[in-house]
Image: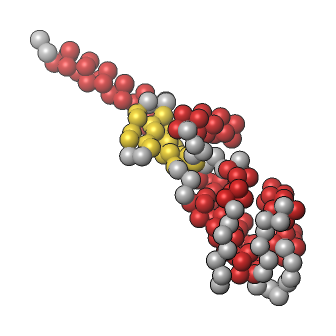
């Protein structure tokens, strides 16, 4: 297979589609499904080959690539193109976040926007839920952990209260 150099601007539309690791998983599953259509003896663009399998957002992005002449021709080059998208998605910086609640989509989008702005580049959030942090959040990025949860404050308060009771 010939490795085609991919114009990095093709990845920009995918940045708008991802906020958390679930979004990346969804896109990667779509791409894996699309790749199954490439070697079925069909000719043409990815959207022509994958047809009804595509989500509307994925179809829109791929059609834009076609219109701009950015989609490679041929099964192997198209597969390389799709694999490069997966590789790009896997390499977006991740911030691990622990919350005490299941966030809404709006909350996730807003939080992603704020963290990306703070970090200086688009990030993807790896969100986990832990009801024992009571409230707030714990953030981990590049090996640094910031605990803004209420559980630590409660633990400190209980420890102080226990000390005051046991100290004459």
The reply to whether residue 108 is in sight is yes
Which quadrant of the rendered structure holds the C terminus?
A: top left
Q: Nearer the viewer, residue 28 or 77?
A: 77
Q: Quadrant of residue 37?
A: bottom right
Image x and y of residue 98, in percent: 48, 41
14, 158: nearer the viewer? 14
Left or right of residue 115: residue 163:
left
Quarter containing the N terminus:
bottom right
State whether residue 29 appears in this view: no
Image-based side of 64 in relation to 142, left or right: right
Hey, which residue is sitting farthest bottom in the picture?
41
Q: Residue at x 26, y 18 (%)?
A: 161
Expressed as whole percent of the image width and height from the top left, the position of residue 119 reads 52, 38
Name which residue lies at 71% across and 56% down: 9
Give the quadrant of residue 159. Answer: top left
Give the x, y percent position of residue 80: 67, 74
> Toward which corner of the image does residue 66 lie, by quadrant?
bottom right
**Left or right for 56, reference 17:** right
Outermost residue, left side: 168
């Amino acid at each position: 297979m010939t490795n085609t150099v991919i114009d990095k601007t093709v990845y920009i539309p995918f940045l708008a589609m991802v906020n958390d690791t679930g979004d990346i998983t969804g896109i990667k599953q779509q791409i894996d499904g699309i790749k199954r259509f490439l070697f079925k003896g069909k000719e043409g663009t990815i959207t022509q080959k994958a047809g009804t399998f595509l989500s509307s957002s994925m179809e829109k992005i791929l059609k834009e690539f076609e219109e701009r002449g950015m989609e490679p021709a041929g099964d192997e080059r198209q597969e390389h193109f799709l694999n490069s998208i997966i590789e790009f998605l896997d390499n977006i910086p991740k911030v691990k976040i622990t919350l005490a609640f299941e966030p809404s989509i709006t909350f996730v989008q807003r939080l992603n926007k704020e963290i990306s702005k703070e970090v200086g580049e688009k990030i993807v959030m790896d969100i986990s839920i832990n009801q024992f942090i009571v409230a707030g959040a714990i953030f981990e990025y590049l090996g640094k952990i910031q605990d803004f949860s209420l559980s630590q404050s409660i633990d400190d308060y209980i420890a102080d209260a226990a000390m005051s009771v046991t100290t004459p």
